[in-house]
Amino acid sequence: MAKPHILVLAGDDASEVLSQAGFTIAGEDHQRRQTAAIVVDTRGASGPKAADLVRSLKAALGPRAGLFMAWSNGEENFDISAFDGVLDAFATPSVLAARLGSSLRIAVMADEAKLRFRTLARFGGPSHPPIVNSAKVPRILMFGQPGPDLLQFSTAITHLGAETIAAFTSFTAFDYLHESEFDGVVILARDDRATALSFCAAMRRNARMFHMPCLILGSPDFDNPHEAIERGATDFAVAGDDDPAAADRLLNFVEEKRSRDALNLAFAAARAPAAMEATTGLYAPTFFLAHLESLVQRAHETDRPLSIAVARLDTEASLGVVHTRQGIERLIGQSGAMLSRLVRAEDVAARLDQTTFVVAFPSSDDEAASIAANRIAAVLECTAFDVQADHTSYSNDQPIQIKLAIASASLSPQENAAGLLQRVTRMLEKGQNA
């Protein structure tokens, strides 16, 4: 699967670190790919000129411009309003991968949300997502044994306008997280590193806390900062090293999470009776076809990939023991409902006809779409569906497992929406998967 292509205008050190973070640097391979982000140096003398460079590039690239990220060492010598975000030049590759990857994902989600509500308005739905109040003061939980280091970091966070609440035991900390609303967690790994790492890992096993930013605050002799990231920390910092910068990074992650949460709420609200298919709760074919045209137009404008996958029930294998229309619809309804929970918020899932589903994957190439489609099919095929409404049409009321045929492909240059859908449908009928 092709990694996002990053153009780095910030020197070899930035290129090296971003390459270690897993991104493909523009100019390092022979393939022409759309640039997902442009990283601009803002250090030293480059800072005052950086904003003008960004504005010139935005004007020249138009819709094809990706994100513009500042490569900063903490100097406040540039106009941050010209950028979509800031990358810390001192951050580890794993932290940069999380920061830039999250920013790219949010950009795709925001773009798709605008397009989806624009299409939804044509079906009698809202033309804009609901307004989310993001002006609330961020609340940060500070977990660890009391001491000057924890107090100093708490002070750095409060100076940036956030509220902190301390918890001195893991039991108290989890009680706070379950009973109250927090935006982020700081874990002090000074005296008991094992507990700090275990607490972070436990957060990642909890669905409510999975995406909550978590900073592990270590001592200067912390053996392996990378272990903190591997155990689920969003970021790692040494207490007292540069607390204001670490606190600022944490609040940036908090802001990103709030943006992602607001977009998830927007996608959940992107519904209208005329746009939905009643049995499955997925989008109706009329909405999907209309929206696919917008997605195709946007993909051509931005030079970004767009892929779709079509999945069709093998009627002989899946429906051989279900004989009534009521039973078939119940089985399709359960399959479609599960499908809706297996795709990302920005993906567009619909029911095309009685036994066919389709999913559009914005900003995803054919390899990514194929992997996603196969994973979705694997989950659906290993699920046992209970079609009680049709209990007289098969023996022993045994749960039913379905069998799917799938095909996927990416949009080709100059191809339109109808052409893409017809091409993937033909591939499905021929038993191919690109």
Image: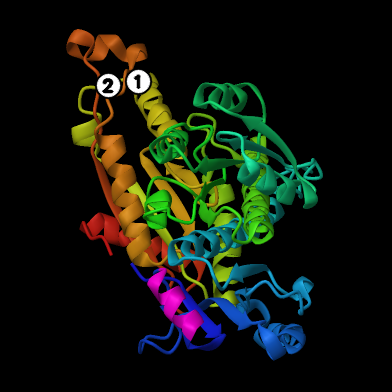
Quarter of the image with the C terminus in it = bottom left
Give the residue type at disc 2: His
Q: Is residue 313 visible?
A: no
Q: Provide the residue designation for mark 1.
A: 327
| Up-down relation of residue 189 to residue 387 (above or below) | below
Circle 2 residues within 10 Å: few <14, some 14–19, many ≥20 = some
Mark sitting on residue 52:
none
Quarter of the image with the N terminus in it = bottom left
Give the residue type at disc 1: Gly
Q: Are marks 1 and 2 in contact (CB under 8 Å)?
A: yes
Magenta residue check for 19: yes
* Numbered circles on residues, count: 2
Label 2: which secondary element? loop
Give the magenta range: 13-21
Q: Where residue 425 sits in the image (x, y, percent)?
A: 34, 57
| Up-down relation of residue 160 to residue 297 (above or below) | above
Circle 1 residues within 10 Å: few <14, some 14–19, many ≥20 = many
Residue lying at 47% horizontally and 70% vertically, measured from the top left: 305
Q: Provide the residue designation for mark 2.
A: 323
Q: Quadrant of residue 175?
A: top right
Q: Nearer the viewer, residue 246 or 221?
A: 221
Residue lying at 66% horizontally and 25% vertically, measured from the top left: 180
In the rendered structure, the answer to whether residue 373 lies left or right of residue 286 reads left
Magenta residue check for 333: no
Label 1: which secondary element? helix
Q: Is residue 143 visible?
A: yes
Q: Nearer the viewer, residue 52 or 344?
A: 52
